[in-house]
């Protein structure tokens, strides 16, 4: 699986804060055999996020695109809106599972607006910006990612397990 990581952070994009979420996400994706093809830190700008998602899905043809940051309720948190602009289908179960698991750790999980969706043959997943929350959320859905990517890309076999 070819993967890309977009860290969404105004301070990170200006080199005012070190990104620790992107590398943490990269390490987890490696556990399922994903190869990180592209990793960038970009500002919380809806059009910039949208353009990068389009590039990663349509030009680089990545299988999995993970964003970290911009999923909360602050005025500059626009990652879900940018994601909605590019996806063909939403995958609500992934976001629901992440919020359910996070809720076991913090009541603030209810204000997460992270989402997951499909663009063409790519799975796009929004994660929170903190390294702890990003890895906890990703770990929750990590086992389902290879199967989801396989199905998105046309695997005709049945989903049921024996």
Image: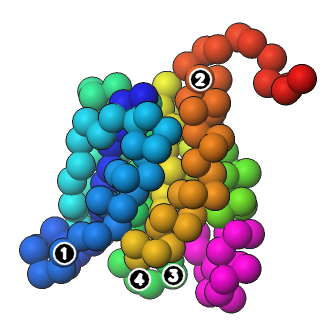
**Magenta: predominant secondary structure element?**
helix
Q: Which residue is mark 4?
A: 75
For label 3, the SS is loop
User: Is residue 76 a member of the stretch shown in magenta?
Assistant: no
User: What residue appears at the point 65 percent right and 41 percent down from the top-left corner?
Assistant: 144
Would you say residue 91 is visible in this rendering? yes
Q: CA distance from mark 3 to mark 1?
A: 22 Å
Pointer 4 or 2: first along the chain: 4
Q: CA distance from mark 2 to mark 1?
A: 34 Å
Closer mark to the observer between disc 2 and disc 3: 2
Q: Which residues are drawn in magenta?
A: 99-113
Closer mark to the observer between disc 3 and disc 1: 1
Pointer 1 or 4: first along the chain: 1
Return the mark for residue 73: 3
Q: Considering only vertical position in the picture, is 58 above or below 71? A: above
User: What residue appears at the point 66 percent right and 83 percent down from the top-left corner?
Assistant: 105
Return the mark for residue 18: 1
Pointer 2 or 3: first along the chain: 3
Compared across the picture, whether 100 is left or right of 37 comes to right
Within-10-Å neighbours for mark 4: few <14, some 14–19, many 20+: few
Q: Are marks 3 and 4 in contact (CB under 8 Å)?
A: no
């Amino acid at each position: 699986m070819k993967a890309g990581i977009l860290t969404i952070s105004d301070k990170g994009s200006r080199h005012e804060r070190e990104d620790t979420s992107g590398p943490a996400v990269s390490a987890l994706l490696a556990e399922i055999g994903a190869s990180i093809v592209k990793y960038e830190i970009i500002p919380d700008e809806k059009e910039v996020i949208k353009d990068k998602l389009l590039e990663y899905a349509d030009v680089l043809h990545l299988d999995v695109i993970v964003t970290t940051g911009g999923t909360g309720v602050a005025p500059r948190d626009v990652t879900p809106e940018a994601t909605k602009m590019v996806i063909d289908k939403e995958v609500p179960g992934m976001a629901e599972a992440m919020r359910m698991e996070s809720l076991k750790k913090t009541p603030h999980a209810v204000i997460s607006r992270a989402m997951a969706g499909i663009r063409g043959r790519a799975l796009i997943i929004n994660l929170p910006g903190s390294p702890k929350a990003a890895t906890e959320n990703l770990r929750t859905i990590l086992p389902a990612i290879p199967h989801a990517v396989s199905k998105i890309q046309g695997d005709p076999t049945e989903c049921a397990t024996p």
